[in-house]
Image: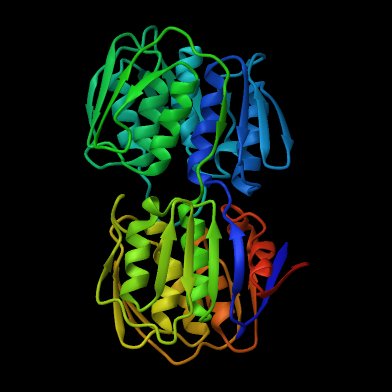
Amino acid sequence: MSVLAIEGGRKLEGEIAVQGAKNAVLPILAATIMNGGKNTIYNCPKLRDVDKTIEVLEYLGCKVKRQENTLTVDSSSLKEFTIPEELMRQMRSSIIFLGAIVNTFGRATVSMPGGCEIGNRPIDLHLKALRQLGIEIKEEHGYIECSANVIKGANIHLDFPSVGATENIMLSSCRAKGTTTITNAAREPEIVDLQNFLNDMGAKISGAGGSVIQIDGVQTLHGTEHTIITDRIVAATYLACGAATGGSIVLKRVDPAHMEAMINVLKDMGCRLTSEKDKIILYPCKCLKEIPMLRTMPYPGFPTDTQSPFMTLAAIADGTSIFVETIFENRYKHVEELVRMGADIQVDGRVAVVRGVKKLSSANVSARDLRGGAALVVAGLAADGITRISNVEYIDRGYEDIEKYIGYLNGNIKRINC
């Protein structure tokens, strides 16, 4: 168990290079099992979720080596097509292995996934799509069993542009017989990164980043090398940290085009930012303004993953901000902890009304999920006194050494092992 101790009231200043994207690396690591070769993944972040994914890869028979932020996965000795419950329950994204395993073995057995309890993430879209590809599925006793003599291409329309379902279709159909077309596909940059990795392996996929993706089945795949894109959610969190303290920070190795929705909200709040090809500069902001209405939406809309850190900004802004969470119904767990620090927030279902206060006060608080934990880090940096955040393992799921990066920016934050 660890606790983050944060001394607030210090302006963040300096520059950092942002880590690789959690939401990109996990499906890419799952994809490595399909080529039976050696894969080298660069810019792989050191995260708890990555560690758990490595455990799954090793259980399946892969040989995995890490050297700093480079991961090597050799899937030539793959032997298992099942993932036990104790591994699946440790993270929600583990369901992404389903498509990769059934593509490789023609069968797969996995339990229902776990992870942060931020609301329902129904996998019915995943299973409906796999059935359309000719995969037989049985659900019983908390397990999902898949089998297919031949995976056949199909035209698949997603009722909702689910990232996970889009990825599972791409993984399961890249060696299907014929062509698969996904309409109303998720458009996130992480989908594009997965397409690029699969194509580097020998797949034939086009359209990622748009609402229609086409996958032409191929017979074989091979090992490859790939560099993971930068984590836009982490980058937005550090911008929120800088804005909350009135600081000036530079984020390097980022793609501003992936962050337009978040950058526009910061500008609406009175922040001044400039961006270059792979850099974002945040200048000091004397007074944060309210957000009249912030509604989370699938990409390219405002991401649900950034709602929590930006709510902390709204809590110390002038005026009243309104948040509408449209993706997950239980993503306001951080609100109770922010209120403990002096925030004025009222929640009614999926709507949160945030009335800005002049200052937050330090408190002992607890992270309830990954992004809610990040919101508490932003609050601790802006508050008076020393804030202690417990349940840091949630934050470690998506933020690589968060205390180190904030330390580079002149923040006073320490990890205390209990």
> Total label count?
0
Where is residue 208 shown, x and y percent of the image?
33, 33
313 is higher (above) or lower (below) than 170 = below
Which residue is painted at 32% across and 36% down in the image?
124
Image quarter (top left, top right, bottom left or bottom right) of the C terminus: bottom right
Q: Quadrant of residue 160?
A: top left
The percent position of residue 232, horizontal first and vertical second, equals 46, 53
Going by the image, does 40 lie left or right of 273?
right
Residue 342 appearing in the image? yes
Q: Is residue 391 above or below residue 258?
A: below
Residue occupying image coordinates x 25% and y 72%: 293
Q: Quadrant of residue 99?
A: top left
Dividing the picture into quadrants, the one containing residue 144 is top left
> Residue drawn 28% across and 59% down?
326
- At 24% across and 37% down in the image, what residue appears? 211
- Position of 375 compared to 387: left or right? left
User: Outermost residue toward the bottom?
Assistant: 358
User: What colour-coding does the image apply?
Assistant: rainbow
Q: Position of residue 9 (x, y in %)?
A: 60, 86
Quarter of the image that includes the N terminus = bottom right
Residue 348 lies left or right of residue 85; in this view the side is left
Seen from this angle, which residue lies furthest front?
Answer: 276
Q: Position of residue 274 (x, y in %)?
A: 41, 65
Q: Nearer the viewer, residue 250 or 370?
A: 250
Image: 178 above or below 211: above
Q: Is residue 144 visible?
A: no
